Image (tube, rainbow, N blue to C red):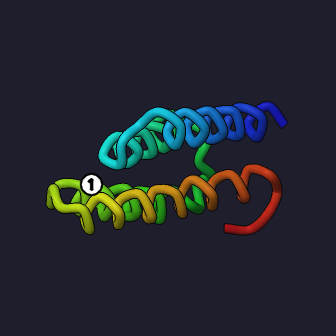
Amino acid sequence: MKRSVLLGLFVTASLMASTSFAAEKDLCATNLQTIENAKAQIPPDMTEQVADSVEKAKADHALGTKKGTEDCIAETTKTIQSLQKTSDGGKP
């Protein structure tokens, strides 16, 4: 229960702050930080999937293009939602 609440809090705070105040590049970085903050709560069966997703998002972000930033945001948002769904008792 505590794990779900903490992950939900991180995700909610990240998404609310990011969409309200951050530019697109910052949203990608914020999402990556949210995932990093939640690493202790990632279920063991999702660790590899999350690591691959973060790697792909960082590569997209490193391109420095608008498309790369959009791809990073899409990838990290998908991962955050998957983590939140898993912590709420759903399947990834």
Q: Nearer the viewer, residue 8 or 42?
A: 8
Residue 12, percent from left and from top: 66, 39
Q: Amino acid at mark 1?
A: Lys
Quadrant (top left/top right/bottom left/bottom right) for the C terminus: bottom right
Task: Name the residue at 84% across, 37% down.
Answer: 1
Residue 42's place in the image compared with 12, above or below, is: below
Task: Name the residue at 82% across, 57% down.
Answer: 89
In the picture of the structure, the residue carrying the numbered disc 1 is 58
55 lies left or right of 82: left
| Neighbours of disc 1 within 10 Å: few (<14), some (14-19), many (20+) | many
Q: Helix or strand or loop: what does disc 1 sit on?
A: helix
Numbered-mark total = 1
Residue 78's place in the image compared with 14, above or below, is: below
Residue 79, percent from left and from top: 53, 59
Residue 52 location, quadrant: bottom left
Q: Nearer the viewer, residue 71 or 90?
A: 71
Residue 23's place in the image compared with 54, above or below, is: above
Residue 18, percent from left and from top: 49, 39
